Image (tube, helix red, strand yellow):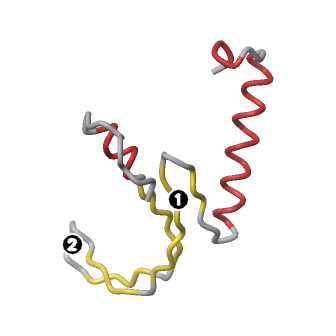
């Protein structure tokens, strides 16, 4: 990144760390983070449920928790599939 932007390696590293820290902080607060033309990071709450240990088959309770989900934008999906992005919405 530092070569394309023209910043030093240290400045580039600090900038990337700052952006990642801000994204992490927003997600910790339960906020959705949308990166235009890339996708959204969404925090979802999962309730308690019964799971199964695959080795023993024994039922085990799984405690409630929050999970992060990434939803790619339509533009990113089109790029990954080698399609043109003309007329593709960001949603």
Determine whether 86 is above or below 50 in the image.
Answer: above
Q: Sequence order check: which comes first, mark 1 or mark 2? A: 1
Q: Is residue 48 left or right of residue 31?
A: left
Which is more toward the observer, 22 or 61?
22
On the rendered image, what quadrant is the N terminus found in?
Answer: top right
Q: Is residue 35 left or right of residue 52?
A: right
- Residue 59 x/y as whole percent: 27, 83
C-beta proximity under 8 Å, tags 1 and 2: no
Residue at 33% over, 46% down:
77
Residue under circle 2? Answer: 56
Alpha carbons under labels 1 and 2: distance apart: 35 Å
- Residue 64 x/y as whole percent: 49, 82
Give the quadrant of residue 83.
top left
Determine whether 3 is above or below 58 in the image.
Answer: above
Q: How many marks?
A: 2
Give the quadrant of residue 8.
top right
Helix, strand or loop at label 2? It is: loop
Helix, strand or loop at label 1? It is: strand
Pointer 1: residues within 10 angstroms few (<14), some, or many (20+)?
A: some
Determine whether 36 is above or below 71 in the image.
Answer: above
Which is more toward the observer, 58 or 76?
76
Determine whether 48 is above or below 17 in the image.
Answer: below
Residue under circle 1? Answer: 41
Residue at 41% over, 54% down:
89
Pointer 2: residues within 10 angstroms few (<14), some, or many (20+)?
A: few
Which is more toward the observer, 24 or 57?
24
On the rendered image, what quadrant is the C terminus found in?
Answer: bottom left
Question: Which label lies toward us, 1 or 2?
Answer: 1
Residue at the far front in the pictured view = 87
């Amino acid at each position: 990144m530092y070569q394309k932007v023209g910043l030093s390696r240290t400045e580039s590293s600090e900038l990337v760390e700052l952006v990642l820290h801000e994204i992490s902080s927003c997600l910790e607060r339960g906020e959705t983070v949308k990166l235009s033309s890339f996708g959204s990071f969404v925090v979802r709450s999962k309730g308690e449920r019964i799971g199964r240990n695959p080795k023993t088959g024994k039922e085990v309770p799984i405690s409630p928790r929050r999970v992060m989900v990434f939803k790619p934008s339509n533009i990113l999906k089109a790029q990954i599939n080698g399609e043109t992005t003309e007329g593709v919405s960001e949603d």
